[in-house]
Image: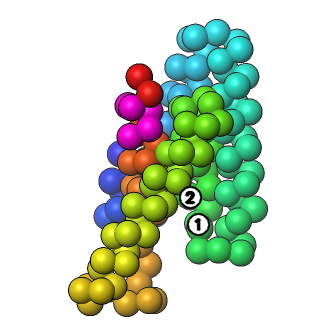
Amino acid sequence: MAAYVDAALQILPDPLVASAAAAAALSAASRGIDDLLAAAAVGALFFLTAFALTSATSLGRGDAKLTGALGLWTGQLQPMLLGLAVGVVCAGIVACALLVVGKIDRRTTMALGPWLVAGASAVWAGSG
């Protein structure tokens, strides 16, 4: 839902991201304390890293919060890194294609949230 709202309005509402993070934490907790701690560590690492990048890049604070929620969801470092890489690369390819055909220009903003969710989802589905 948060990815859809971001695609439509270019905003990631805190209640949606917080709900996703809570659901991910509950899922990890249902698998045991070790999974919960691992998921919390991965979520915190990615949130803090992304939040630090918001001042130096066009990454938004909502995207940083979303990476934290996705880290809780994946619960592991390598799938999370791969998921983010897939999402960012796909977003870049689409942005380049839209630039080439003239649908956007260099000043046009694109929502990154849907791409982050798609990349994490693809990696998560592929690892099951």
Considering only vertical position in the picture, is 68 above or below 98? above
Secondary structure beneath label 2: helix
Within 10 angstroms of label 2, few (less than 14), some, or many (20 or more) residues?
Answer: many
Considering only vertical position in the picture, is 112 above or below 109? above
Residue 114 visible to an observer of this rendering: yes
Distance between mark 1 and mark 2 Cα atoms: 5 Å
Within 10 angstroms of label 1, few (less than 14), some, or many (20 or more) residues?
Answer: many
At a point 41% along the width and 84% down the height, the residue shown is 108
Considering only vertical position in the picture, is 93 above or below 125? below
Amino acid type, residue under disc 1 in the picture: Gly
**17 and 50: which is toward the camera:** 50
Magenta highlight on residue 66? no
Residue 13 visible to an observer of this rendering: no
- Residue 62, which numbered label? 2
Amino acid type, residue under disc 2 in the picture: Gly
At a point 46% along the width and 42% down the height, the residue shown is 120
Relative to residue 122, is residue 120 drawn left or right?
A: right
Question: Dividing the image into 4 quarters, which one contains the C terminus?
Answer: top left
The quarter of the picture where residue 100 lies is: bottom left
In contact (CB < 8 Å): disc 1 and disc 2: yes
- Residue 60, which numbered label? 1
Secondary structure beneath label 1: loop
Relative to residue 118, is residue 46 drawn left or right?
A: right
Residue 51 point in image, percent of width and height: 70, 59
Residue 17 point in image, percent of width and height: 51, 45
Q: Magenta part of the protein: which range?
A: 122-126
Magenta segment main secondary structure: helix
Relative to residue 77, is residue 63 drawn left or right?
A: left
Question: Dividing the image into 4 quarters, which one contains the N terminus?
Answer: top left
At a point 73% along the width and 54% down the height, the residue shown is 49
Residue 98 point in image, percent of width and height: 30, 79
